[in-house]
Structures are given as C-alpha cells and as structure tokens.
Amino acid sequence: MDNGGRTPFQQFTWTVLRIVVGLAYMTHGLPKLFGLLGGFGGAGEAAPLISKFGVAGTLETFGGLLIVLGLFTRPVAFLLAGEMAVAYFWVHLGGGLWWWENGGELAMIDSFVFLLFSAWGAGSVSVDAWLAARRE
C-alpha cells in the first residue's frame, strides 16, 4: 500500500487530522440539517432543506462523515473546499476583506484544509486506501 513516503507518525497524525476535521465539520451541519446540537441558529430546529442553509447542512453533515471515513476523500474534500470558499465570499466578505475583520477565519482555514485533503488524499488508514488495496 502506498503511504506517499510518509513516516508512520505522519500517517497517524494525517489520519487523526482527517477524522477530527470531519467530525468538527459535521457539528456545523447537524444543527442545520436535523436541529441537533442546539439547532439552526440556536432555535432547536432544522433549517429548511430547500434553502442555502439546507444545502450547506447536507454538505457539512454527509461530507464531514465521508471525510471521517476517508471515502471518496479527494472529490468530497474539493467540493467542501469550494463550499467554504463560497461561504467566505458570500457570508463573510461583507464584513471586510480580511478574516480578522470579517470573522471568516474558520471558513478560510476549512477551505484550505479541505483543499489539502483533495490534493493528498485520505491517507493509509481510510476506506479509500482499503478499496485501493482490494483493487491491487
């Protein structure tokens, strides 16, 4: 199995980063999609499914889950990087260009972390790696 030339410690930390980021991302989608964790806007309710928040909640919940599992990591991460770039420019840019002015640092960081996952993949401890090993 190709480990991308990474040491075991690098493989371990890459896996942990992927799982933690995916779980954290899901905590942004679960309130929008299912009203969990305080609900959308803290109201204990879900956002309308056919709305920009419903779409975002779907991407965040199920995209985050796929990132945790390491399944379809590259295309899913690319899609989520785009979602966060759109969020930065659509939601945060009105408060100023820079993240320290507009509160968009999390959207910016998420966008670049997902871009990194889309470039480097899920790593050796993932469903993607397991599927690749089965094909060999």
Image: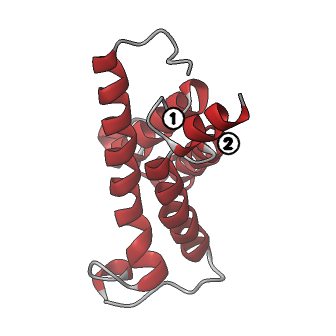
Disc 2 is placed on an element classified as helix
Q: Nearer the viewer, residue 79 or 22?
A: 22
Q: What residue is drawn where x is 51% and y is 28%? A: 116
Q: Name which of mark 2 and mark 1 comes first in the sequence.
A: 2
Q: Residues within 10 Å of mark 1 (few under 14, many from 20)?
A: many
Q: Which residue is mark 1?
A: 122
Q: Residues within 10 Å of mark 2 (few under 14, many from 20)?
A: some
Under mark 2, the amino acid is Pro
Q: Position of residue 33 (x, y in %)?
A: 49, 79
Disc 1 is placed on an element classified as loop
Q: Nearer the viewer, residue 52 or 26?
A: 26
Q: Nearer the viewer, residue 59 or 109?
A: 59
Q: Quadrant of the C terminus?
A: top right
Q: What residue is drawn where x is 31% and y is 89%? A: 43
Label ID, residue 75: 2
Labels 2 & 1 near each other (Cβ < 8 A): no
Q: What residue is drawn where x is 44% and y is 36%? A: 125
64 relative position to 132: left or right: left
Q: Quadrant of the N terminus?
A: top right
Under mark 1, the amino acid is Ala
Q: Position of residue 23 (x, y in %)?
A: 35, 56
